[in-house]
Structure formats: structure tokens, C-alpha cells
């Protein structure tokens, strides 16, 4: 079902079964000559059916439709492979586009996970059940690349790209200055906390995320349109909450660590998680993957702040407080 947010701007809700995110907000801007769809859903039939129904309600002709993908995650990009046509422009941020262009090296990522305390068997299960891998786009369109400051004009919407690294390295928000609306992608969500993970020692994703939050905090914004769940109005208030949340999580990591020396995996196992499981053993393996990634993001953040040290081990890297 499609719902009108303001003249010419609509939302189609795309279900994401088995995902704690519940569904994805796909935004549609309809103008006289062309349309723009912002984010699409997983590459799976249930998403396609919901999208098709919404587009039908709105009378959208896909041969006159362009796409903008806020970041590379499969719940935002996957379905684009079934939707784009020969005449479609498909926009994505330059940095996130690399994931599709280069041969993304899953081995490097697996190696990194092993070094952070995953057991090989569990790791293989986690990788195989990872929804981002299962429902990724298969037919990759030729992308039109966006940078910080790029502008997409669609009808009377002028969308300025804001590079907001953190949730992914190349995440992009769209800001409509005159109407004071912000398409926040997964940079800022209202009902849930965006996932911040790290799968490379080179990228301090949490530090980047905190700076990206500061970057948008004071924008004049009347309405925030996030990638998942509800719209909201208090951008500043939400930014402050998210920053506080991560400072608390960093403190929790220090608390779990105490005077011990531990791997990221063991730290994640002792952190509190908002998930319906009695204990760490019961976590679905894909959720363990997310949890360890998030623990590492906080560890790297604390390390760059001089509060902890990473010890490179032959098999497993460990951390201890300074
Ligand atoms: Zn995402």
C-alpha cells in the first residue's frame, strides 16, 4: 500500500520477514516526466510483490523511473536488480558502490572474524545465513555515483546528498532544504538504533558515525524520513539520544573487559543485547555476527580514544583496558 506524505512524495512499506527491522520504507517521488524511488528492499519475492502493488497504486511506470540507494545493504539495494529498466538512472554513493564493483573479498572478512574469536564452523554458518548475502542484488546496474554535495532534482524536490559514514562507509542522506525534510536512510532511525559494525581495523566506523551525527544535528529539519519504521520530527533530540547510547555501550564494553584480556567475540557474548534469547548460545548465528561486529566497532572507538589496547595474537586478537 502506498501512502502520501506530502504532494508528490509517497511511502511504500516493504516487509522484511525474520528481520528485527520488520520492514523497509521505500520512498517514491512522482513528477510529471520521471519518478524517483529511494531504497528498494531485499531481492526476494515478498519484497517484490509489496513493491509491485505499491507502484501499481501510484500508477508508476518503471520505464520512467530512477533509483537512489542510500547505502549498500541488501535490504535497501537488493530489489533494484528486479526493478531497473534500460532508461533508469541508478544512483548510489561512490564509496558504497565499491562493494558491487570490486570483487568483495569475503575471505578477508572471514579472516578478520576468525581473528576476533569466531570459531570456523560457526563462522561459516553465520556467513551463509547472513541475509545481506542471501538477498543481495544479483544483476548489478551501472551506477551513477554520488558524492557529498551532489544534487538530484526530481520534480520540485531538490535532494542534496550528505555523505554520512558510520552505518556504512559511504552512507548518504538526502536533504531537501526548502521543504526541510531529511531522508535519513539508516543513519538515523527513530524506533530502533542503527547498527554500527566494524569488519576492518582500518575503519573506525563508530567514530565516523559520531561525527556524521554531529554533521546533521543542527540542520533545519521539520520531518525526518528514515529507512525503517516511523517518521519523526525531533532530529536534534534523536541525535543526542543516539550519541548517548553509544557512549553508554562503550562504557559497557569497558565494564565487561574490567581487568581482563578478551577477544571481541567473548566481549560480545557478555554484553546485553535487545534480542529475544536467554543466552548467547541461543543467539541465531547471523545475530552473533552483527553483535561481534558491533563490539569491534566500540573497541576500535575506545582504542582510538586511548582507553584500550589491542593485542595482535597469532590466532586471536584480544583487548585490554589501559
Ligand atoms: Zn543498513
Image (spheres, grey):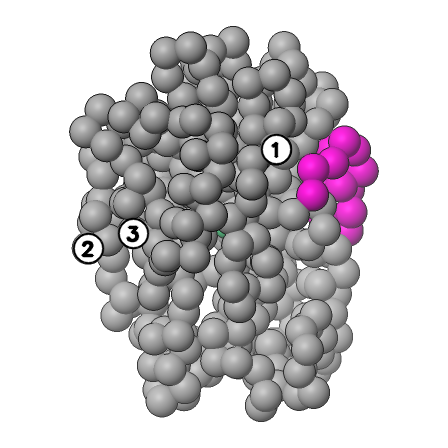
The quadrant in which the N terminus is found is: top right
Q: Is label 3 or label 1 in front?
A: 1
Mark 2 close to ligand 1, CB under 8 Å: no
Query: Which residue is tagged 2?
Result: 103
User: What x and y, as percent, mark residue 122?
Assistant: 41, 86
- CA distance for labels 2 and 3: 14 Å
Name the image quarter holding residue 88.
top left
> Is residue 303 or residue 42 the one in the foreground?
42
CA distance separating discs 1 and 2: 38 Å
- The reply to whether the residue tagged 1 has its Cβ within 8 angstroms of ligand 1 is no
Residue depicted at 77% across the width and 51% down the height: 244
> Does mark 3 have its CB less than 8 Å from ligand 1?
no
Q: Magenta span has 236?
A: yes
- The residue beneath circle 3 is 137
Q: Which one is earlier in the sequence, the residue at label 3 or at label 1? A: 1
Q: Which residue is mark 1?
A: 3
Earlier along the polypeptide chain: callout 2 or callout 3?
Answer: 2
Amino acid at each position: 500500500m502506498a501512502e502520501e506524505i506530502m504532494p508528490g512524495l509517497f511511502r511504500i512499506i516493504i516487509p522484511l520477514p525474520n528481520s528485527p527491522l520488520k520492514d523497509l520504507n521505500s520512498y517514491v517521488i512522482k513528477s510529471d516526466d520521471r519518478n524517483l524511488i529511494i531504497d528498494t528492499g531485499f531481492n526476494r519475492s515478498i519484497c517484490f510483490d509489496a513493491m509491485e502493488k505499491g507502484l501499481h497504486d501510484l500508477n508508476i511506470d518503471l520505464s520512467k523511473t530512477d533509483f537512489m540507494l542510500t547505502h549498500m545493504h541488501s535490504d535497501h539495494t537488493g530489489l533494484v536488480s528486479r526493478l531497473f529498466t534500460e532508461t533508469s538512472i541508478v544512483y548510489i554513493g561512490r564509496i558504497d558502490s565499491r562493494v558491487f564493483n570490486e570483487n568483495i573479498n569475503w575471505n578477508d572478512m572471514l579472516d578478520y572474524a576468525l581473528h576476533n574469536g569466531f570459531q570456523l564452523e560457526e563462522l561459516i554458518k553465520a556467513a551463509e545465513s547472513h541475509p545481506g548475502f542471501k538477498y543481495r542484488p544479483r544483476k548489478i546496474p551501472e551506477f551513477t555515483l554520488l558524492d557529498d554535495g551532489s544534487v538530484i532534482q526530481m520534480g520540485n524536490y531538490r535532494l542534496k546528498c550528505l555523505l554520512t559514514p558510520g552505518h556504512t562507509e559511504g552512507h548518504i542522506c538526502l536533504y531537501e532544504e526548502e521543504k526541510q525534510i531529511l531522508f535519513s536512510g539508516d543513519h538515523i532511525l527513530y524506533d530502533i538504533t542503527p547498527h554500527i559494525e566494524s569488519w576492518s581495523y582500518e575503519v573506525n566506523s563508530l567514530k565516523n558515525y559520531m561525527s556524521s551525527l554531529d554533521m546533521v544535528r543542527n540542520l533545519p529539519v521539520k520531518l525526518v524520513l528514515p529507512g525503517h519504521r516511523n517518521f519523526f520530527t525531533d532530529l536534534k533530540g534523536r541525535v543526542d539520544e543516539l550519541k548517548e547510547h553509544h557512549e553508554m555501550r562503550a562504557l559497557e564494553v569497558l565494564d565487561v573487559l574490567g581487568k581482563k584480556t578478551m577477544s571481541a567475540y567473548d566481549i560480545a557474548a557478555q554484553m546485553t543485547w535487545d534480542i529475544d534469547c536467554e543466552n548467547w548460545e541461543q543467539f541465531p548465528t547471523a545475530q552473533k555476527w552483527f553483535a561481534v561486529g558491533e563490539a569491534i566497532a566500540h573497541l576500535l572507538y575506545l582504542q582510538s580514544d586511548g582507553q584500550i589496547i589491542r593485542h595482535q595474537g597469532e590466532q586471536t586478537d584480544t583487548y585490554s583496558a589501559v
